Amino acid sequence: MLHVEINGAAPSIADLHRVAVVNYGHFTSMQVRGRRVRGLDLHLRRLEDASKELFLATPGADRIRSLLGQALAQVAGDVSARIAVFAGSGDLSVPTADVDLAVMVSLTDPVPETPQTPWRVRSIPYVRDSAHLKHTATMGLTGARRAAKSQGFDDALFTGPDGLVIEGSIWNLGLWDGETVTWPQAPKLPGITEQLLTSGLHRIGVPTRPRPVVVQDLARYQSAFASYSWCPAQPLASVDDISFANRSEVFTLLGKAWDSVRWETV
């Protein structure tokens, strides 16, 4: 299933051409179940903040929410949703030029949250441009992911020039030492699933912390997991030659924390 709307209407060829050739914009992705979303307010805030930074303007959270609701009314059942903001018109080479912000809502088949077989991950030196933004310039991360998979790994974990672990290709890394969930601290995208899990873990009394981590430090942890919109806690079997025991208790706690997250109706 694929349903796409730009500003609440079927996209024209000119709209799609603009999206295809102008690689300047940002987006957020979410799972929608019965027109409900976990962390909808965080998704809307992400879009607002990124729009202000990239375009010095915003389409407005109420408008985005309305456009998502309108698109959802055209399909039946659960979906995966991606909302992107881009300049529908205007010369982006001129920073002071007015731009007409467009909102594209794409709906595809839902993705089950059930974890896959634990991933084998390869560390790759790479830092995304404007790493705090979920932007559309994904050539570098896609290339790193392809490189990892070509060597038999399931995905890539990015590291910085200082050796710090940053983030996965499209996910944040969580680490468990038997007592605390650690989120590696580095210039990265603050994932919404990470934020929601952190809040949920605090609700059930499990401590979390941001902390700088280098690849060699990973051997100190019992379990590791990828956290992203498709799955809140995808187990990792290994990073390079460092293996994880993936103790069941942490995934039970993560599941309990995730179940505590409030759903919001679109």
Image (cartoon, grey):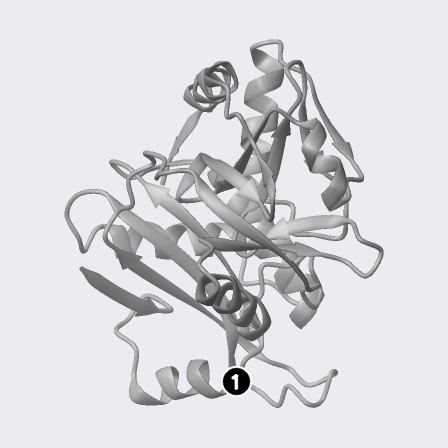
| Residue receiving disc 1 | 22
Using the image as rendered, state which of residue 97 and residue 1 is in the foreground: 1
Residue type marked 1: Val
Q: SS class of the residue under badge 1?
A: loop
Name the residue: 25% across, 73% down: 10
Q: Residue furthest front?
A: 241
Q: Residues within 10 Å of mark 1 (few under 14, many from 20)?
A: few
**Residue 83 location (% of width, % of height):** 43, 59
**Residue 21 location (% of width, % of height):** 48, 88
Which quadrant of the view contains residue 203? Answer: top right
The N terminus, quarter of image: bottom left
Using the image as rendered, state which of residue 228 and residue 132 is in the foreground: 228
Image: 69 above or below 207: below
Q: Residue furthest right?
A: 162
The C terminus, quarter of image: top left
Q: How many marks?
A: 1
**Residue 63 location (% of width, % of height):** 45, 56
Q: Residue furthest top?
A: 205
Is residue 205 shown left or right of residue 96?
left
Image: 116 above or below 89: above
Which quadrant of the view contains residue 152? Answer: bottom left
Name the residue: 54% across, 75% down: 139
Name the residue: 53% across, 70% down: 136
**Residue 130 location (% of width, % of height):** 71, 64
Image: 239 above or below 71: above
Q: Residue furthest left?
A: 76
